[in-house]
Amino acid sequence: MSDAAPSRYVRSTQGIAGYSPANHTGTSNQRLVSRDTVGAQYLEVLIGTIVKGHGASRHFHPNLEQAGFLLQGAGISEIDGAETLARPGTWRHYRKGVPHRVTVTSDEPFKTIVVYAPPYGENRDSVVVCEDNHSPGHATASAPGMQEAIAKRPRFDSPHFSGLRAEPVINAEKSGAEYMEVFDLQLAAGGGASSQTLHGLEQVLFVRAGRLTGEIAGSAFEARPGDFVFVPDGASHAYTAPEPSGAEVFLIRAFPSLEQE
């Protein structure tokens, strides 16, 4: 598959111009999965890079939630008044309305995956800058029927999955997530998902180690470490880990708000 044309569903940071996000200093974001790049409706995924001594001012998103996975660097992270040391290898989930900020302390640039659901797109109506380090946040009310919608979401007990271990990292039960889920997937050699079509969600696979091959909507793809693979809502898809060592993958699933349905 290495000689095949690159798939439009596979995204990497190579050649993607950065932009300076609002309420940040010393920061460059590269938007990989969005409405403009792949037609995503339910989520936005980007890579953010921040230099030492800079970061995000204290803010919150009243109508969307955010998650981040630190790839390199270190910093001081605050979530709703509680400060912790941010180190590589850790996911963080910010529920809607929860104030948060980060300041980079490492000489090595702070590089993080950022997920927004619903998409943020630098919309000024979706962010509130806090007046100080103690001011509370506030969130829009959850839509009626949200808990029933969460309970009906597809689970990992399908016969379409084999040779795969899925560990939930972010979901409603673990972190109060409403619009997203994150799983840590460990795929054995030849493990993965046989052809299936899922409705009512979009998916992003981030390859941490190994290699994935498969198809999305009839189009073949190959993804290597550092690549993001987007699966649209309602698209047939299948993937496998062809290497003898298998693959390590994050699976991000995003769902429409009830207002979008």
Image: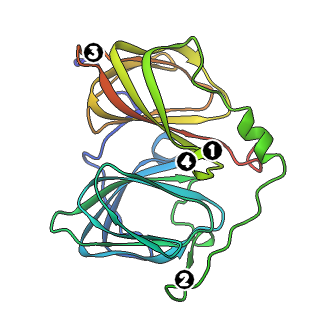
Label annotation for residue 109 = none
Amino acid type indicated by mark 1 = Glu
Q: Earlier in the sequence, mark 4 or mark 2?
A: 4
Q: Earlier in the sequence, mark 3 or mark 4?
A: 3
Q: Locate the C terminus by quadrant.
A: top right
Mark 4 → mark 1, Cα distance in angstroms: 20 Å
Label annotation for residue 43 = 4
Label annotation for residue 1 = 3
Amino acid type indicated by mark 3 = Met
Label annotation for residue 130 = 2
Q: Earlier in the sequence, mark 4 or mark 1?
A: 4
Contact flag, marks 2 and 3 (Cβ < 8 Å)? no
Mark 3 → mark 4, Cα distance in angstroms: 28 Å
Q: Is residue 77 above or below residue 180?
A: below
Mark 4 → mark 2, Cα distance in angstroms: 24 Å
Mark 2 → mark 3, Cα distance in angstroms: 49 Å
Q: Among all residues in the image, which is located at the extreme left?
A: 107
